Amino acid sequence: MEKKRIDYLEEDSKLKEYSDKLLELRKDGVNKISILKQEIAAAKRNKLIDAAARKLFITENQKKIEEAKIIAARNEKEIAAISKEAVKYANELAKKNIYETAEEQNKEIARFTEEYNKKTAELKAEFAVRRTEIMKSYEGKNSTADHAARKEDLRINNYELKSSLFDAKSKYNTQINRAKAAKNQTYVDHVQKNRSLRNGTTRFSENVSLNWQNYLYQFKMSKFFLDNGLYIAILIFFIVCIIIAPISGNGQLLSLPNIFTILEQSSVRMFYALGVAGLILIAGTDLSVGRMVALGAVITGLILHPGKNIVTFLHMGPWDFTSLPLFGRLGLALLLSIVLCVAFSAFAGFFSAKLKIHPFISTLATQLIIYGLLFFGTSGTPVGSIDSNIKDMIGGRWTLGFVSGDLVTFPKLIIPAIFAIFAAWFIWNKTTFGKNMYAVGGNAEAASVSGISVFWVTMGIFIMAGVFYGCGAFLEAFKANASAGTGQGYELDAIAACVVGGISFNGGIGKISGAVIGVIIFTGLTYCLTFLGIDTNLQFVFKGLILIAAVALDSIKYLKRK
C-alpha cells in the first residue's frame, strides 16, 4: 500500500512535471526572496560579524531581494495558473488513492478482526481443556497438599490464559492501528502535496478536513468520555433544567435575558478565575481570592461613594472624594485596587517562590491578614453604594429592544471581561512568559536546568493574578455594597471553575478557554438551580459533586499519562 501511495503522488510523471516547472519558476523569485530574508535575519543575530560587514551584507542581500521581486512579479501569473492546474490534478489522483486505500485497509481490518476473534476462541477452548485436565488429575486426592497444588495449577493456567489473550489483543491493536495509520497517511500526503504545489500556502477547507481526519484517526471512545464525560453530564443537566422550568411554572429558562444575566454574573468572576488559573497551572492554588475581592471592592466603594463616607478605615477618615474629577476618581479606585491586590499577592508569591512554601499555605496566611485588617479597619461596616451615575456608566446595561415580548438589555460588564480574556489568552499563548509558565508547571526542575528562572516566573504569575483580582474587585463594587465580608467563598468558585475547565491540579496542563468555560458552567449551574427554586444549601451539594468529579477525572488522566 505504501508503494501505491508513492506511485500516485511522487512518481506520477505529469505531477512530477508540474512540480519541476513550479520549482524552476520560483527558484529565482519567491524562493530566493525567502532564502535571502533568512540570511539577513541570521546576520542580524550573529554577534561575531562586525557592524560594517553586517551592514554591507544586508545591503547586498536587500538589492538581491529587489531583483528577485521583479522575477517573482514576472512569473506570478504563470505560477498561479500552473499551481491551480497541478492542485486540481493532484486532487483527482488523491481522491482515487484515498478511496482505494480506505477500501483495502477496511478489508484488512475485517480480516484482522476475524483472525483475532478466532484466536481468542481457540485460546479459551485450549485453556478450558487444560483446566479440565487439571481438575481430573486431582480427582480423589483430598489432602491439604493436593488442594494447594490444584489451586496453584489452576492459578497458573488462568494466568497463562490472560497472558496469551493479552498478547493476542496487543497484536490485534497493532495491526488495526497500522491499518488506520495507512488510511490517515494517504490524506496527510494529499494535503502536504497540495501545500508544496502552492509553495507552502494552506487552505482553510484543507486544514479543517485534515484536523477532522486526524481526530477520527486518534479517536477512542474511552478517551472521549474521559475527556468530555463531565461536560456531557452537565449539558444533560442543563437540558433537563430547560425542560423542567416551564413545566414547574418558573417560565422559560432558555431566553435571551436569562443568557445575558448568566454572562453578566460570569463577567466579574471571570477575573478571579483568570487570576487563579495561572497558579493552578504551576500546581498551586489561591485561598486569598475572596479577601482580595473585599479589599479592592471596599477601596473602590470608599472612593466612588457619593458624598462623605460613613466608614472610617484604621481610624482615618471619613473621606469625601467627590471633589475629584470623575475619571480621576475612577482611575484612583482602579489603581489602588490593583496595587493593593498585587502587593498582597506578591507577598504570598515571594514565600512560595523563594522558600518553596506551598501556595495553599502562603495564600491562606494572606487571606487571614487581609481579613483581619479589613474587619479591624472598617469594623465590618458596609461602605455604602457608589455614585449611581458611575454605577450605570460601567455596571449598567444598554437597552437593545424587545424580543418575543421580553425587554432585552446588554450588560456592560461583559465588555471588560472580554478584554481580560483576550489579555490572559495572549499572555498564555503568545509570550515567552506564557511558555515559561507551562514549563514550570510541567516540571520546575527541568525548567530551571533549561535556564528558566522559576522564582521570577512564579512571582510573575502571582503578580499577574493580583492584577486580575484588582480589576475584578474594582468591578465587584458596581454589583453590591462592598464590605469586609464581600467575596466570601469566591476563591472556591474560581478554583472549581478552573478545574472543571480542564486546568490540571497536577500542573502544566490547561487553557484559558477552559477557565472561561468553567466560569460560565458554574455560574449557569447556580442560576439554573436558583431559577428552579432549589434551596441554596442544596446548590453547594451540586457544586461539590461536580468539583470532586472534575478532580477525579483529572487524576485518572494524570495516572494514565504516567
Image: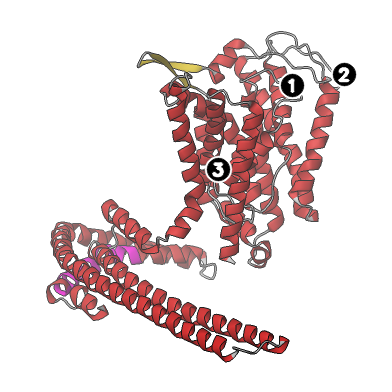
In terms of depth relative to the viewer, which is nearer, 526 or 517? 526
Q: Which mark is residue 203?
A: none
Name the spot of residue 129 as percent of width and height, x first. 47, 86
The picture quadrant where one finds residue 55 is bottom left
> Callout 3, which amino acid?
Ala
Total marks shown come to: 3
Question: Which label's residue is closer to the chain start, 1 or 3?
Answer: 1
Q: Residue 315 carries which label?
A: 2
Q: Give the range drawn in magenta.
A: 16-35
The picture quadrant where one finds residue 180 is bottom left
> Callout 1, which amino acid?
Ser
Name the spot of residue 413 as percent of width and height, x first. 53, 25
Specify the principal SS of the magenta part. Answer: helix
Residue plotted at (40% across, 15% down):
406
Q: Is residue 20 magenta?
A: yes
Sort mark 2 into few (<14), some (14-19) or many (20+) by Cα contacts within 10 Å. few
In terms of depth relative to the viewer, which is nearer, 462 or 109? 109
> Callout 2, which amino acid?
His
Q: Which mark is residue 483?
A: 1
Element on which disc 2 rests:
loop
